[in-house]
């Protein structure tokens, strides 16, 4: 598969990008406003300057672990799953009925905190996994909830077949994959999804998320490795092949959105170039 090494790809993917201040945003107010501010104030019990003074140093600490734009630009303060899932109430109802949820590449576990508030479901039904357990630990500090958040956390590399995640004896009804699978190549996407599907899903499982995309699906060489940016057709092809290889079948409901429609600042469009998009998806395992 051709790999794009075009140096004109915004300012984003250069060969030696570190340190890159492009995706380190000094002003928290680009995202800490409106509903996001209300959520964080209510959840942490910290208001106004106290909340900001709390968040800044923790974000800086986390940015050192991978330099992810979603951390550096404060994007983790946002909550987009209600925009992604047409029937968000149905998702919440499933959680209330004790459906188990896995957040893959969870970072701080911010999505799980939102679902916790919206559903009131026990956090023991929640599972989270990430390469960096330090990010999950920082989540307790960010949300001030070590006593309250009882989700199971599994540290591990999704590219490793010995990852303890694949040995869990749990079939998840909901898998969250937010800004995650785009970090991997086409072949890596397939090997991660084969493990996920075979070990952790059941008929009715929904894989829900969003990620960076492109009108012209293609692979890019980046500081995080070879990343595959899907369009709707390539995502459908991926899940068709994963289904065939695992003896399952999946319905892909996906759409491409412009960077601004996906709720990102304009400068993300400059990084990604004019064909850059986001893709929102809900992928459902069909009955056997
Ligand atoms: C771009 S961040 C997205 C975080 C979060 N899901 C969100 O939407 O803000 C990607 C996350 O994947 C984790 N990650 C990267 N490579 C991984 C791997 N090979 N196995 C497991 N987690 C990985 C990173 O540590 C990071 O927390």
Image (spheres, rainbow, N blue to C red):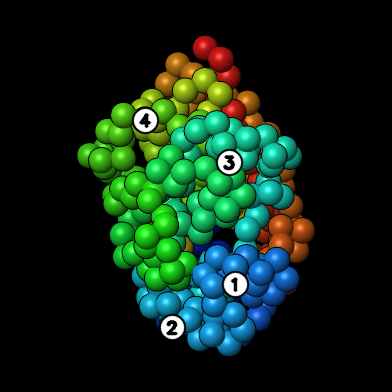
List x then y, in percent, for residue 185: 45, 47
Depth check: 102 or 90 in front?
A: 90
SS category of the residue bearing label 4: loop
Please report the residue visible at 31 percent of the width from the left and 59 percent of the height from the top: 133
* First in sequence: mark 4 vs mark 3: 4
List x then y, in percent, for residue 211: 58, 52
* Cα–Cα span, label 2 and label 4: 36 Å
Q: Which residue is mark 3?
A: 208
Q: Which residue is mark 1?
A: 41
SS category of the residue bearing label 1: helix
Marks 4 & 3, CB-CB < 8 Å contact = no
Please report the residue visible at 54 percent of the width from the left and 72 percent of the height from the top: 45
Please report the residue visible at 45 percent of the width from the left and 16 percent of the height from the top: 247
* First in sequence: mark 4 vs mark 1: 1
* First in sequence: mark 1 vs mark 2: 1
Q: Is residue 161 left or right of residue 231?
A: left
């Amino acid at each position: 598969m051709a790999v794009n090494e075009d140096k004109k790809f915004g300012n984003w993917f250069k060969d030696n990008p570190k340190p890159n201040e492009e995706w380190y945003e000094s002003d928290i107010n680009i995202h800490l406003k409106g509903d996001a501010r209300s959520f964080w104030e209510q959840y942490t019990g910290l208001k106004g300057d106290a909340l900001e003074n709390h968040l800044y140093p923790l974000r800086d600490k986390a940015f050192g672990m991978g330099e992810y734009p979603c951390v550096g630009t404060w994007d983790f303060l946002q909550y987009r799953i209600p925009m992604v899932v047409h029937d968000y109430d149905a998702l919440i109802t499933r959680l209330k009925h004790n459906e188990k949820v896995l957040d893959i590449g969870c970072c701080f576990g911010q999505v799980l905190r939102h679902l916790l508030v919206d559903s009131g479901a026990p956090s023991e039904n929640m599972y989270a996994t990430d390469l960096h357990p330090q990010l999950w630990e920082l989540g307790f500090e960010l949300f001030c909830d070590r006593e309250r958040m009882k989700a199971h956390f599994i540290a591990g590399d999704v590219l490793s077949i010995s990852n303890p995640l694949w040995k869990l004896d749990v079939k998840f009804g909901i898998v969250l994959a937010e800004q995650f699978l785009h970090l991997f190549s086409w072949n890596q996407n397939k090997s991660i999804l084969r493990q996920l599907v075979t070990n952790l899903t059941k008929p009715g499982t929904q894989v829900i998320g969003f990620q960076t995309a492109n009108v012209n699906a293609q692979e890019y060489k980046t500081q995080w490795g070879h990343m595959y940016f899907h369009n709707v057709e390539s995502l459908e092809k991926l899940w068709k092949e994963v289904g065939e290889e695992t003896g399952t079948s999946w319905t892909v409901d996906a759409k491409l959105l412009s960077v601004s429609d996906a709720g990102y600042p304009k400068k993300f469009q400059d990084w990604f170039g004019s064909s850059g998009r986001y893709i929102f998806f809900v992928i459902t395992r069909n009955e056997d």
